[in-house]
Structure formats: C-alpha cells, structure tokens
Amino acid sequence: MAIYSRHLPAWKQEEVAEIKRCAGEYAVFGLVDVYGIPATQMQQIRRNLRGRAVLKMTRNTFIEHALNDLGGPIQGMKDHISGQSALIFTDENPFRLFKVLETTKTKMTAKPGETAPEDIVIQKGPTSFRPGPIVAELQQVGIPAAIEGGKVRIRETKTIVRKGETFSRKVADALAKLDVRPMDVGLILQAAFYRDAILTPDLLAIDEQAYYNNIMLAAQQAFNLSVNAAFPTGITIEPIIAKAFREAKGLAVDAGIYEKDVMDEIIARAYREASALKGIVE
C-alpha cells in the first residue's frame, strides 16, 4: 500500500485500491461532474454506458488519495476535481467519450443559486397564462408582462439573467413557470487522462463537420499548389500534363506557330479578327 493511503481504515483503502485498479485497467481515466442529476436520469445514463464505460461514484478525497498513490503525470488530474466529481473509465478514445457524454445531457429548469451558462433572454409574445398573480410575479423579476386579449403577454424581449450570474429564487420560479430550461444536466466531463496527457473539454469538443470541411479545403489547396507549381504526384501528374498541354497550345496560337495541332485554331482566330476588322471598316 502506498504511503498516501496506508493510514486509512481498511474499507477506505479498498475503495482507493479499486480506483487505482481501474486506472491501470482502462485506457482513459476521466473525471465527471454529476451534480444535480436526478436518480432516474442517472439510472438511464448507466444503462446507456453499459459495455462502453464504467461509471464509479466515490468521494473526492478517495480520488485524491488514489492519484497521489499512482504518482506521475496522472496526479495533475487533482486540479480538475471540483463539486460532485465521479470517475469514468473506458477504452474508448477520449474524443468519442466526450461525444457520448454530451448525449447524456438534458435541459432542466434552473435552481436558486445556480449559475447561468448563458444569457437568459425572454422573447416577446403571447403566453398560455390567463390573467392572475403570474403577471405580478413576472413583473417583479423584470419581465414586462401585461394582459392582452384575455392572456398574459410578454411585451418586449428582455435579458433576465446574464451569463455567469446566479439565479435568485424568484427568477428561478418565474422561469420554471415559463418552462425555460437553461441548465444542461448530465455527465459533464471535467478532464480525461489518456496516454500520459490530461485533456480538457475545450480540447475534446471538436466540431466534426467543421473539421471535415477544413480537411477537404486543405486537400484542395494542396492539389492546386501541386498543379500550379508543377510538382508531380500520383494524383496530380495527369492534371499537370493537361495544364502544360493547354498552355503550350495557347502559346503556339498566340505566336502563330504553324503546327498541325494548332492550325485550325490559328485560322479560326484569324477569321474572327478579320471579321471584326471588316465590321469596323464598313
């Protein structure tokens, strides 16, 4: 037993040992935030991950003990432990893991004290509410509500909470009544350890279509550069020869070099020029 966890009670040592065993057995060691996930959603997430990843609920202190015992680059994962962390182990590559975890998220109403992930904007327009106390409740949190045609209506588009601000109880209640669900609830990847490197979500959140488009653009630009620079490859040799042939033929026509392959074009060009000149003279 490593020096960092040998002073722990036996059952805690077993918990730390289990974390270390999984860290050595799987290709990816991940930290996920499970805060606010309802029990029913967590059960569904576990079912969806079955056969692809192992989700382990444990204490942050046990994770820290295990990382200290393991030593080396993986200890840097301690910097990413926050909130209600859990562990996820998988042999999937971390980019695919991130994508899978994104699918576990669902939109939920905000709770008092939570932080807005983005600006919360209430659009103007009608609501389904009949006249009643709801009008005053909306007005108290800055939502310009009024009664029109027997229904409650939002008179103008309004930003109620800015990104990074916290939801007050009144604001959270009002947004819930409007069925505004700004919070992503699901497994949120905090960091993943893979091949001695720590990968954070900003590195793993790849727009696959944009990535594909960039590859296609780079391939087209490389092809054009090869052809224009006359740098032959297995793919560009034919276009280079075709381009050289067209340019040589154009040069022969411009210079009036009487070769059998360009005679017809030289005569046709002379005819066009003569016809144009005739039109000017007449």
Image: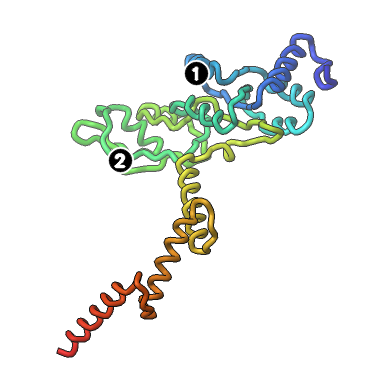
Name the one closer to the observer, 237 or 57. 237
Q: Nearer the viewer, mark 1 or mark 2?
A: 1
- Rendering coords of residue 60 (x, y %): 68, 23
Label 1 Cα neighbours within 10 Å, binned few <14 / some 14-19 / many ≥20? some
Give the vertical position of 27 relative to 256 (above or below): above
Q: Residue furthest left?
A: 282
User: Picture quarter containing residue 52?
Assistant: top right
Q: Which quarter of the rendered picture does the C terminus lie within? A: bottom left
Residue 48, label in figure:
1
Coloring scheme used: rainbow
Q: Secondary structure at mark 2?
A: loop
Seen at 75% across and 15% down, the residue is 17
Number of disc labels: 2
The answer to whether 37 is drawn above or below residue 126 in the figure is: above
Pinpoint residue 63: horizontal percent, then vertical percent.
71, 22
Could you tell me which secondary element the residue under label 1 belongs to?
A: helix
Q: Amino acid at mark 1?
A: Asn
Q: Image check: 243 left or right of 134? A: right
Classify residue 55 as left or right of residue 21: left
Of all residues, the one furthest to the top in this rendering is 10
User: Percent from the top left, x then y, of residue 131?
Assistant: 25, 29
Q: Mark 1 vs mark 2: which is more N-terminal? A: 1
Q: The residue under label 2 is which amino acid type?
A: Lys
Q: Nearer the viewer, residue 40 or 180?
A: 40
Q: Which residue is mark 2?
A: 124
Q: Residue at x 29, y 41 (%)?
A: 155
Picture coordinates of residue 76, whole percent (x, y): 72, 33
Using the image, tell me which numbered label, if any, was put on residue 136. none
Quadrant location, the N terminus: top right
Q: Residue at x 83, y 20 (%)?
A: 2
- Residue with the most extreme front position: 260
